């Protein structure tokens, strides 16, 4: 594309940003939808506040926020979406009158990615593995989607309990139950499993739970990790004859949701699927 006087500029703020796939996502959407825009990663080492305010002053049309700033950006925002506030993490900024409004499209993206595979969360029993920032966000998505029961399994019980207590307070009923990983035997007989820990990231030999018995109860497995493309968790699920998905579609749909918020448009389903295939090829070729 050629940058000219009417090119809209979008960006990503994080540290590091070198390996981000977001520019590919937005360049692909812009080209297919014939939009004059560009998307630039900005490595912000400190001075997040100046970075965000400077971006607004420069008229940057939209920002993504990544590690380590998804929580730290919140006090800088002019407005915040209700779900993003509960989750406590923001990854997308949309310009409003005197600043930006923050959203969490990681979670709306996860929802869309799961729905595109026919996975509906409403009324379901769901097991979250892990209790870090990603798991916390998933727990609130499940609360919003009115999952029937949310089990949060973690190596450190206290962290699972903090998230479960927060979700239960938010819902004003006992929907979330914290457990140690080793307590998986007390789970009901069937559940959707979402792998939201960092175990298995960038290595294919480990899963957060290695016992086969846990996987016998998994109806469908979803790993937020997509590097490696097929994780050990996914292999365990597939060994039980069940479907398992990686986190690449979630990444694609968080980008699509951000793109739609910025441009007030709807990305057609076929284009979204083309984008998933393009990104899949890119990721697999880099393995
Ligand atoms: P993120 O914000 O990306 O979710 P995080 O906050 O560092 O990352 O959380 C990582 C999650 O992976 C945690 O649930 C962590 O368990 P603890 O809370 O017990 O630390 C989990 N995790 C990381 N390494 C693990 C391991 N070797 N075994 C089990 N769980 C592990």
Image (cartoon, helix red, strand yellow):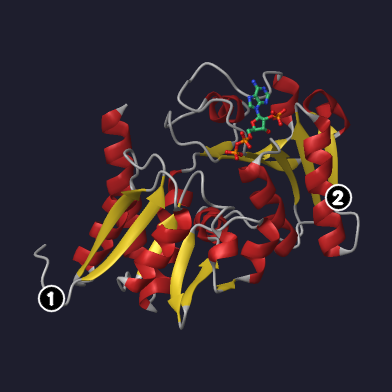
Q: Residues within 10 Å of mark 2 (few under 14, many from 20)?
A: some
At x 31% / y 64%, what residue is drawn?
Answer: 10
**From the viewer's perspective, is 186 left or right of 29?**
right
16 or 25: nearer the eye?
16
Q: Which residue extends farthest top? A: 205
Report x, y in % for residue 248. 43, 44
Which residue is disc 2 drawn over?
165
Which image quadrant is residue 104 in? bottom right
Rendered residue at 26%/31% (across/down): 285
Point out the quarter of the image occupied by ligand 1. top right
Left or right of 78, for residue 97 = left
In the image, which is nearer the foreground, mark 2 or mark 1? 1
Image location of residue 258, percent across then percent down:
43, 65
| Element on which disc 1 rests | loop
Dividing the image into 4 quarters, which one contains the N terminus? bottom left
Can the viewer see residue 195 in this picture? yes
- Residue at coordinates 47% horizontally, 80% vertically from top-left? 98
Specify the label residue 5 is tagged with.
1
Q: Nearer the viewer, residue 214 or 84?
A: 84
Q: Position of residue 149 (x, y in %)?
A: 82, 51
Question: Of all residues shown, which one is farthest toward the bottom?
Answer: 97
Q: Is residue 117 above or below residue 287?
A: below
Find numbered disc 2 in the image and state the secondary structure of the residue it sits on.
helix
| Residue 169 location (% of width, % of height) | 86, 59
The span from disc 2 to disc 1 (Cα, nearest Å) is 51 Å
Look at the image and tell me in which quarter the C terminus lies.
top left
Mark 1 lies within 8 Å of ligand 1 (Cβ measured)? no
Query: Which quadrant would residue 174 be assigned to in this image?
Result: bottom right
Q: Quadrant of residue 281?
A: top left
Bin the neighbour count of mark 1 within 10 Å (Cα to Cα): few under 14, some 14-19, many 20 and up: few
Q: How many marks?
A: 2
């Amino acid at each position: 594309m050629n940058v000219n006087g009417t090119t809209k500029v979008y960006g990503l703020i994080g540290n590091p940003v070198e390996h981000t796939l977001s520019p590919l996502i937005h360049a692909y959407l812009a080209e297919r939808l014939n939009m004059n825009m560009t998307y630039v990663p900005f490595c912000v080492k400190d001075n997040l506040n100046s970075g965000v305010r400077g971006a607004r002053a420069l008229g940057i049309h939209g920002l993504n926020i990544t590690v380590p700033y998804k929580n730290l950006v919140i006090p800088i925002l002019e407005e915040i979406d209700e779900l993003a506030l509960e989750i406590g993490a923001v990854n997308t900024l949309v310009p409003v009158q005197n600043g930006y409004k923050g959203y969490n499209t990681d979670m709306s993206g996860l929802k869309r990615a799961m729905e595109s595979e026919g996975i509906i969360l409403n009324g379901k029993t769901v097991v979250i593995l892990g209790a870090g920032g990603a798991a916390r966000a998933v727990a609130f998505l499940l609360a919003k989607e009115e999952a029937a029961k949310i089990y949060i399994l973690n190596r450190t019980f206290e962290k699972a309990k903090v998230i479960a207590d927060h979700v239960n307070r938010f819902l004003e009923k006992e929907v979330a139950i914290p457990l140690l990983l080793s307590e998986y035997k007390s789970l009901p007989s069937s559940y959707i499993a979402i792998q939201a820990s960092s175990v298995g990231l960038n290595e294919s030999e480990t899963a957060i739970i290695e016992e086969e018995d846990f996987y016998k109860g998994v109806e469908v497995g979803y790993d937020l990790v997509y590097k490696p493309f097929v994780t050990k968790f996914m292999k365990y699920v597939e060994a039980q004859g069940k479907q398992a998905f990686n986190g690449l579609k979630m990444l694609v749909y968080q980008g699509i949701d951000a793109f739609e918020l910025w441009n007030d448009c709807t990305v057609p389903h076929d284009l979204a699927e083309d984008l998933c295939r393009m990104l899949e090829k890119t990721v697999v070729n880099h393995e």
